[in-house]
Image (cartoon, rainbow, N blue to C red):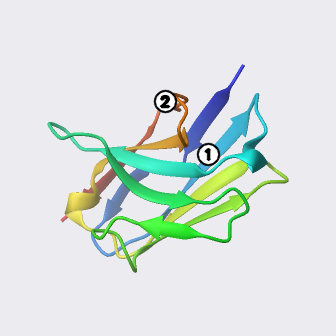
Amino acid sequence: QVQLVESGGGLVQAGGSLRLSCVTSGFSMSWYRMNWYRQAPGKERELVATISSGGESTKYADSVKGRFTISRDNGNKKVYLQMNSLKHEDTAVYYCNVDAEDYWGQGTQVTVSS
């Protein structure tokens, strides 16, 4: 059974940092591109960052480029999202996702106070 469990969210002041983690199980994570999405209230879910199966290639939404860093540890089946210089508009529920598969975690809430 595929499981994705996100953690690391919380309340932080603007300009602060958070590191999100996604622990995966039930599939061979090293075979898959992995993504972080977010969904703010009243908005559609958007792709924030993506990382290739081996970790050599990453891409970011323009809104987070230069502030967020996605990484992965295939040996421990984890994916991370380092978020720096957080802004109020980064407030959302953040989800870990297996690319091209309908596998999602429960999400972790990130709230940035202005």
Q: Where does the image place residue 51, in percent across and percent down from the top left?
A: 58, 60
> What separation in Å lies between label 2 and label 1 (alpha carbons)?
10 Å
Tell me if residue 81 can be seen. yes
Q: Where does the image place residue 23, in percent across and percent down from the top left?
A: 68, 42
Q: Residue at x 27, y 53 (%)?
A: 91
Residue found farthest to the left: 42
* Sequence-earlier tag: 2 or 1: 1
Q: Residue at x 79, y 39 (%)?
A: 28
Q: Which residue is mark 1?
A: 22
Side of 11 where 57 appears, left or right: right
55 shown above or below 10: below
- The image quadrant of residue 42 is top left
Question: Tag 2, which secondary structure?
Answer: loop
Question: Tag 1, which secondary structure?
Answer: strand
Q: Which residue is mark 2?
A: 106
Q: Amino acid at mark 1?
A: Cys
Residue found farthest to the front: 100
Residue found farthest to the bottom: 66
2 and 1 marks in contact (CB < 8 Å): no
5 shown above or below 64: above
Q: Amino acid at mark 2?
A: Gln
**Crowd class of label 2 (few under 14; some 14 to 19; many from 20; radius 10 Å):** some
**Crowd class of label 1 (few under 14; some 14 to 19; many from 20; radius 10 Å):** many
Q: Where does the image place residue 72, in percent across and percent down from the top left?
A: 68, 59
Q: Which quarter of the figure is the C terminus placed in? A: bottom left
Tell me if residue 8 can be seen. no
Q: Residue at x 40, y 76 (%)?
A: 67
